[in-house]
Image (cartoon, rainbow, N blue to C red):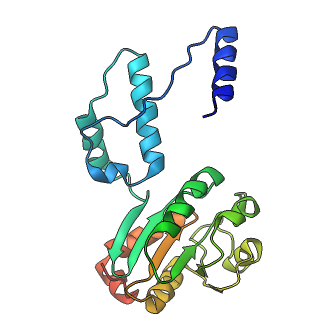
Amino acid sequence: MPQEALEVIESRAKELGSRHIRLCDEAPKGLSDPMFASVPQIFNVRILKAAMEALGEGLDAAAIDNFRQRTGLRGRWEKLADSPLVICDIGHNEQALAINMPRLESLPHKMLIMVIGMAADKDIAGVAHLYPDRARYHFVAAKGRRAMPSEKLAQVLQKQDFECHESVEQGLAAALIEAEADDLVFIGGSSYVVSEALELYSDPEAASNTTLSV
């Protein structure tokens, strides 16, 4: 954060009689690697650490790690397969996509294949520029009334190379059929889309029908 912004924050905190708590530079040690697969999760843990310290409490890394393992905390930069590499992430707003998309494009790959679905009540036009243009898109619609129809999503995102599908399962199957071993498949745009993809990967029968490789 720029020094000028910090000075404004500190000044305002003094005016309100509030404490200004700076985040720690690093996440606490002792958490297993999957916790750090996602940049937003790293920020979240840093915020939690700062809050606990402000309350005079220490942060028990083992307790947080135990919570992660019990709840899963899935869908944040989660690798679902290796060949081709398949990654999913629930990030859909500008802040998350500004982190995830450059990181995605930096990964080694021959072709980037995107399986994307979004909720109709989100600012889709506002994040369209963050989705890479040099990619093959499979637009999908998750189950439920909030999902934007894939054809309309294609119109809003305005990508050149795409197909539209009625469901996450259909779109994911099409993406995996055309993907080669050195391609990169990304699933995202909505928590609902990622949730359905995770269900497909965890269901042996559905995985067989969808040609999922794990």
Q: For the point 60% across and 82% down, which residue is it? A: 166
**Residue 188 shows in the view:** yes
Q: Nearer the viewer, residue 164 or 137?
A: 137
Please state the horizontal and vertical placement of residue 213, each as a whole percent of the image.
32, 83
Q: Nearer the viewer, residue 37 or 88?
A: 37
Please state the horizontal and vertical placement of residue 18, each as a whole percent of the image.
60, 12
The extreme front residue here reads: 3
Q: Is residue 21 above or below residue 32?
A: above
* For residue 24, side relative to residue 71 (left or right): right
Q: Nearer the viewer, residue 114 or 123?
A: 114
Quadrant of the drawing holding the C terminus: bottom left
Quadrant of the drawing holding the N terminus: top right
Q: For the point 70% across and 57% down, which residue is it? A: 122
Q: Is residue 204 above or below residue 119?
A: below
Q: Nearer the viewer, residue 38 or 176?
A: 38
* For residue 114, side relative to residue 127 (left or right): left
Q: Quadrant of residue 209?
A: bottom left
Please state the horizontal and vertical placement of residue 93, each as a whole percent of the image.
63, 54
Please state the horizontal and vertical placement of residue 153, each as a whole percent of the image.
70, 73
**Residue 195 shows in the view:** no
Q: For the point 63% across and 27% down, which residue is it? A: 3
* For residue 19, side relative to residue 27 (left or right): right
Q: Is residue 173 above or below residue 30?
A: below
Q: Quadrant of residue 55?
A: top left
Q: For the point 49% across and 72% down, which residue is it? A: 186
Q: Quadrant of residue 162?
A: bottom right
